[in-house]
Image: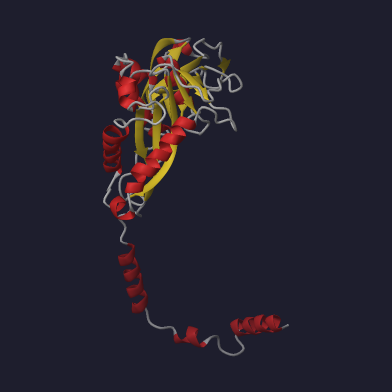
């Protein structure tokens, strides 16, 4: 399992660490040391402020310690990154990350992040969830010991995600991490710490790993387009396929890579979108409530009604057309046709 895979080509411009068919089947395997394998998954959880929440979590296979955990309002790549990045910066870098085939876990950004940090990303084979029992048991513990305590009345007191995450961190550190685990016979955190210390990546390396990238071919006029934006690049790159590296929340700053080397920056030429379409920040409380448009429609309706009331009544129109008029003949023909 420690041998490097020769890899396979992907549409992202990167090389997959293992193919789905060649992925290891962990089964009842237990890692021999901390930070050898982190298993990740997402749990559908309670509603906060009227919104459904999702818990992204990563568990150390050897110790069962929680390496990363964070609730969010969406089951997407942004919320996954929000859980994983702080964990890598404080817990160290695992040799393997073992996840399922959910959309957030197969996104190109996770492949890139793992490749940059030297992590072997392994996806479980569809229909063969072997090796995922530990994270599933942990989620059962979360449901039975943490979420079960959040009765409807108590959950109503949790006003936002920050409050929910504070409660979960407190439960993890003071309850779950300190109690003896039924399978290992040791408290998870103590078992994990026994294998330390663990080197952590430098912040610049971590930031680079969590940037996103897309590939584009430079036009003859030395421009590239991405999500409606147009950028100017080095004219020497015309006709070449380049990698654009960026913070998904700021598309005004793009680094250009060509042949794996730095090729300067992409200068914004025409910007219509400042954030990647997938880069949706956590919605603020009340974001699903219809917003006032700034136009007083009720006043406009009132003014329209007043203007109509001010017009003289057209009694002739109310009485209908006089006998023998074209209008009356058309009406009689219509009525006759309807009766026929």
Residue drawn where x is 44% and y is 32% of the image: 135
Residue drawn where x is 51% and y is 10% of the image: 4
Residue drawn where x is 31% and y is 32% of the image: 179
Q: Where is residue 70 in the image (x, y as percent from the top left)?
A: 34, 35
Q: How is the image coloured?
A: secondary structure
Would residue 250 be seen by someone viewing this image from the given angle?
A: no
Q: Where is residue 132 in the image (x, y as percent from the top left)?
A: 49, 30
Give residue 165's quadrant in the image.
top left
Give residue 117's quadrant in the image.
top left
Is residue 163 left or right of 257 when viewed as pictured? left
Q: Where is residue 311 in the image (x, y as percent from the top left)?
A: 37, 78
Image: 294 above or below 210: below
Q: Which of 31 and 99 is in front in this view?
A: 31
Q: Quadrant of the C terminus?
A: bottom right
Would residue 166 be seen by someone viewing this image from the given angle?
A: yes
**Number of marks present in the image shown:** 0
Q: Nearer the viewer, residue 321 or 285?
A: 285
Q: Which residue lies furthest to the bottom in this view?
A: 323
Image: 221 above or below 51: above
Q: Nearer the viewer, residue 233 or 165?
A: 165
Q: Residue furthest right?
A: 340
Q: Where is residue 149 in the image (x, y as percent from the top left)?
A: 32, 47
Give residue 279's quadrant in the image.
top left
Q: Which of 125 and 189 is in front in this view?
A: 189
């Amino acid at each position: 399992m420690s041998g490097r895979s020769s890899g396979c080509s992907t549409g992202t411009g990167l090389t997959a660490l293992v193919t789905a068919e060649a992925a290891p089947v962990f089964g009842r395997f237990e890692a021999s040391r901390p930070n050898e394998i982190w298993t990740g998954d997402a749990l559908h959880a309670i509603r906060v402020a009227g919104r459904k929440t999702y818990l992204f979590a990563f568990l150390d296979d050897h110790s069962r310690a929680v390496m990363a955990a964070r609730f969010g309002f969406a089951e997407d790549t942004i919320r996954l990154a929000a859980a994983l990045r702080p964990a890598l910066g404080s817990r160290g870098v695992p040799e393997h990350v073992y996840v399922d085939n959910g959309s957030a876990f197969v996104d190109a950004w996770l492949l890139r992040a793992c490749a940059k940090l030297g992590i072997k990303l392994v996806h479980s084979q569809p229909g063969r969830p072997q090796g995922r029992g530990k994270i599933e048991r942990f989620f059962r513990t979360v449901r039975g010991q943490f979420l079960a305590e959040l009765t409807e009345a108590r959950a109503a007191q949790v006003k936002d995600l920050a409050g929910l995450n504070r409660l979960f961190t407190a439960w993890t550190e003071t309850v779950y991490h300190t109690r003896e685990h039924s399978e290992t016979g040791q408290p998870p955190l103590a078992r994990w710490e026994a294998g330390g210390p663990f080197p952590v990546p430098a912040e610049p390396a971590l930031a680079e790993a969590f940037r996103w990238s897309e590939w584009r071919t430079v036009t003859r006029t030395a421009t590239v387009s991405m999500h409606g934006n147009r950028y100017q690049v080095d004219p020497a790159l015309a006709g070449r396929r380049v990698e654009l590296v960026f913070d998904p929340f700021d598309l005004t700053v793009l680094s250009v890579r060509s042949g794996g080397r730095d090729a300067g920056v992409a200068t914004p030429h025409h910007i219509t979108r400042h954030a990647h379409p997938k880069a949706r920040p956590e919605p603020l409380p009340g974001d699903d409530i219809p917003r006032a448009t700034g136009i007083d429609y009720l006043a406009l309706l009132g003014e329209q009604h007043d203007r109509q009331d001010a017009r003289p009544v057209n009694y002739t129109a109310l009485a209908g057309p006089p006998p023998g008029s074209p209008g009356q003949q058309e009406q009689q023909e219509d009525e006759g046709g309807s009766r026929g």
